Image (cartoon, rainbow, N blue to C red):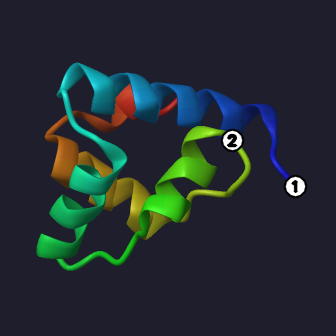
Amino acid sequence: MSTGYDLIFGKNLRSVRMSCKMTQNELSEKLKAKGYELSVHDINEIEMGKRYVYPHELKAFHLALNVSYDVLLP
């Protein structure tokens, strides 16, 4: 079950990814290169606010997108 937090995080993630001119597939590959397994489906679900983000995934997005946590968090 998604929450308002999940929806806002997902929108923030999508906004940052798009500003980096990165597709979901490219983000998934970048995450894999850093040792994190998140599929395109996972990323899509997160961006749509349909999936919870675990703490280690937050760290993965922070590292892969090279942004501060504040940019991602609601």
**Residue 22, located in which quarter of the rendered image?**
top left
Q: In the image shown, does 31 or 57 lie closer to the viewer? A: 31
The C terminus lies in quadrant? top right
Q: In the image shown, does 16 or 56 lie closer to the viewer? A: 16
Please give left or right for residue 74 compared with residue 25 in the image. right
In the rendered image, residue 69, in percent from the top left (x then y), is placed at 33, 38
Q: Residue at x 32, y 58 (%)?
A: 59
In the rendered image, residue 19, in percent from the top left (x then y), is placed at 24, 20
Write down the residue under mark 1.
Answer: 1
Write down the residue under mark 2.
Answer: 49
Amino acid type assigned to the residue bearing label 2 in the image: Gly
Q: Residue at x 43, y 31 (%)?
A: 14
Mark 2 burial class by Cα count in 10 Å: few <14, some 14-19, many 20+: many
Label 1 and label 2: CA atoms lie apart by 9 Å
1 or 2: tag closer to the N-terminus: 1
In the structure shown, which secondary structural element does the residue marked by tag 2 occupy? Answer: loop
